[in-house]
Image: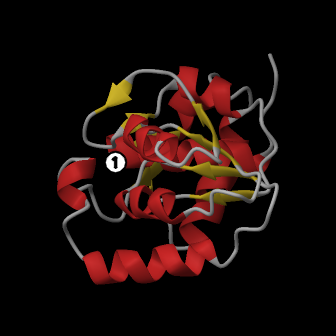
Amino acid sequence: MDKYSPEERRLLILDLLAAHHKVMAAELAEPLGTTEATIRRDLRYLAGEGRCKRIHGGAISLSPQTGTLTERSTQHVAQKQALAMAALSLVKPNQLIFLDASSTHLLLASLMPEHHGLTVVTNSPAIACRLLERPGIRTILIGGEQDPLVGGAVDITAAEGIKKFRFDLGFLGV
């Protein structure tokens, strides 16, 4: 069984938290190829970063999703635009970038420069469709069961797909 790097595990844990709003260390250890103690350390790290709240044996998300990806894209538009512009300033030519399922990243996908030789990987069909409208960007869609509230794939199939890449940049919705 291949092990994930700490960064990959934490990305997967955050995706699972976004989808289910709660994770338990005992349930994550085997699928992520590590021990409960390692998962607990990852959860402490994420909680220390303000990305989740620790509970006995696991963690919960700080704020649940409020609607589908399409519904969320109409909320807090000015803040999403500011975040997308800030994220865009980090993008450099020829990078491999991950965009997780997020309404802000849906906007960011619309702003990505077309002639920078970018490859963008996403777990969101909506983001992939938006990127396909931008012909200069190579687009890779991670598969797996789609969660309608998240707007993308957050299961073990998606986790397996994402571990094949070494990203230059990763944008995660929280």
Q: Specify few, some or many for label 1: CA neighbours under 10 Å numbering under 14, 14-19, or 20 or more.
A: some
The residue sitting at the top extreme is 1
Instruction: Give percent across and percent down for residue 13.
Output: 55, 45
The local secondary structure at tag 1 comes to loop
Instruction: Give percent across and percent down for residue 94.
Output: 82, 55
- Whether 172 is drawn above or below 82: the answer is above
Q: Observer-nearest residue: 54 or 124?
A: 124
Q: How is the image coloured?
A: secondary structure
- Whether 69 is drawn above or below 157: the answer is below
Q: Amino acid at mark 1?
A: His
Q: Observer-nearest residue: 75 or 16?
A: 75
Q: Is residue 57 visible?
A: no
Residue at image position (22%, 50%) is 70
Instruction: Give percent across and percent down for residue 117.
Output: 77, 52
Q: Is residue 97 visible?
A: yes
Q: Observer-nearest residue: 160 or 73?
A: 73
Q: Quadrant of the C terminus?
A: bottom left
Q: How many marks?
A: 1
Q: Observer-nearest residue: 51 or 106?
A: 106
- Whether 34 is drawn above or below 105: the answer is above
Residue at image position (53%, 49%) is 134
Asked whether, in this view, residue 36 is left or right of residue 15, the answer is right
Asked whether, in this view, residue 140 is left or right of residue 129, the answer is right
Q: What residue is disc 1 on?
A: 21
Residue at image position (66%, 24%) is 160
Which quadrant of the view contains residue 172? bottom right
Residue at image position (80%, 16%) is 1
Asked whether, in this view, residue 112 is left or right of residue 65, the answer is right
Instruction: Give percent across and percent down for residue 88.
Output: 60, 73
- Whether 96 is drawn above or below 35: the answer is below
